[in-house]
């Protein structure tokens, strides 16, 4: 295929540009359907006449169907968009980047979606979709799936398709988190995934950032102790990766404490640990749920994060050696590879 693409780029580069544009249109429709022509034109920053022409072409190919509220993908369109995604990855050399990053980071799997989630909200949704597809591939009967909070893992929950038959799995929050917006709390995300899968779920109603004495006291409660034991028995963990400074601020840390954290070299955060770029733990917050030492017992640890701003944070977390899978975007992946060169 690479030889064909090379010839195409030399002889008819406009065909590749046209294919990328049509893939982008289909991708936007898949996340926003049904969507109107004018809305699409505004999102894509293309003229309405161009968008109308492209939509007419895609309808004639049987990939779209129209209704009063806009257009949506047909069954054939749903299938084609996944095939196109693989083609675009090959076109941009992303498959090679995945292999190089997998080797460098010593991971079992690296999944990269095209684009930059810092600049395009759709790319962030694609991260969620890629992670959700991988989850469906690896979960099995009796699996316990633990999920952290945050907007990126929230996108994973949004992307999990609604099941028509029950799944014999249990979904749990990996940690507490009553201080976060309710929509992106681990409890909310766990419940959403479970309901979509027609599966069971349990919740952990404790804050994520509390004092050591409070953690010890809560840990003695029979109900809390039982759910914590279940969480630590998870065989799948899906977690986000935070920027250390942003997380410290959002948790309401004293500004001086945040400055100390930055001076200590913290760049990333996960599981209540702040990491330096080389994976060294700079600071740990007290909380209940999954801790770093628990990761070695989890069959699949899936980190989901993207964007150039997160590149250092991702490296700091995956350097701990417990990660199994990384789902990231093209921009973050390239930045991480460049880091190894410097």
Image (spheres, rainbow, N blue to C red):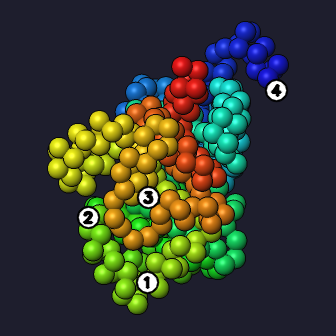
Label 3: few (<14), some (14–19) or many (≥20) C-alpha neighbours in 10 Å: many
The answer to whether residue 118 is visible is: no
Q: Is residue 125 left or right of residue 143?
A: left
Label 4, on which residue?
A: 1
Tag 4 secondary structure: loop
> How far is the residue under mark 3 from the one under mark 1?
18 Å
Tag 1 secondary structure: helix
Give the percent coordinates (x, y) of residue 336.
54, 30
Label 2, on which residue?
A: 179
Labels 1, 2: front one? 1
Name the residue at the top extreme.
Answer: 10
> How far is the residue under mark 1 from the one under mark 2?
21 Å
Label 3, on which residue?
A: 271
Q: Quadrant of residue 166?
A: bottom right
Labels 1, 4: front one? 1
Q: Are marks 2 and 3 in contact (CB under 8 Å)?
A: no
Q: Does label 1 or label 2 sit earlier along the sequence?
A: 2
């Amino acid at each position: 295929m690479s030889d064909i693409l090379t010839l195409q780029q030399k002889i008819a580069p406009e065909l590749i540009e046209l294919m990328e544009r049509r893939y982008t249109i289909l991708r936007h429709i898949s996340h926003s359907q049904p969507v109107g022509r004018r809305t699409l034109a505004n999102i894509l920053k293309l003229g309405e006449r161009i968008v109308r022409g492209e939509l007419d072409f895609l309808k004639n190919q049987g990939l779209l169907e129209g209704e009063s509220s806009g257009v949506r993908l047909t069954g054939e369109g749903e299938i084609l968009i996944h095939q196109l995604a693989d083609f675009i990855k090959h076109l941009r050399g992303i498959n090679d980047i995945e292999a190089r990053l997998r080797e460098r980071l010593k991971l079992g799997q690296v999944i990269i979606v095209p684009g930059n989630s810092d600049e395009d909200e759709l790319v962030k949704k694609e991260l969620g979709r890629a992670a959700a597809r991988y989850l469906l591939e690896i979960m099995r009967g009796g699996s316990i799936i633990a999920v952290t909070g945050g907007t990126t893992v929230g996108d994973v929950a949004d992307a999990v398709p609604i099941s028509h038959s029950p799944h014999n799995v249990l979904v749990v929050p990996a940690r507490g988190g009553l201080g976060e917006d309710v929509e992106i709390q681990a409890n909310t995300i766990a419940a959403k995934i479970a309901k979509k899968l027609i599966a069971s779920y349990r919740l952990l109603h404790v804050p994520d950032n509390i004092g050591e004495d409070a953690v010890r006291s809560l840990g003695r409660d029979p109900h809390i102790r039982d759910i914590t034991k279940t969480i630590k028995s998870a065989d799948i963990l899906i977690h986000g990766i935070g920027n250390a400074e942003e997380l410290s601020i959002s948790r309401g840390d004293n500004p001086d404490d945040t400055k100390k954290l930055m001076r200590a070299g913290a760049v990333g955060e996960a599981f209540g640990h702040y990491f330096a770029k080389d994976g060294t733990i700079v600071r740990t917050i007290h909380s209940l749920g999954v801790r770093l030492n628990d990761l070695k017992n989890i069959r699949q640890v899936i980190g989901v994060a993207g964007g150039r701003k997160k590149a250092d944070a991702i490296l700091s977390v995956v350097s701990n050696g417990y990660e199994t899978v990384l789902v990231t975007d093209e921009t973050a992946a390239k930045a991480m590879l460049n880091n190894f060169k410097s």
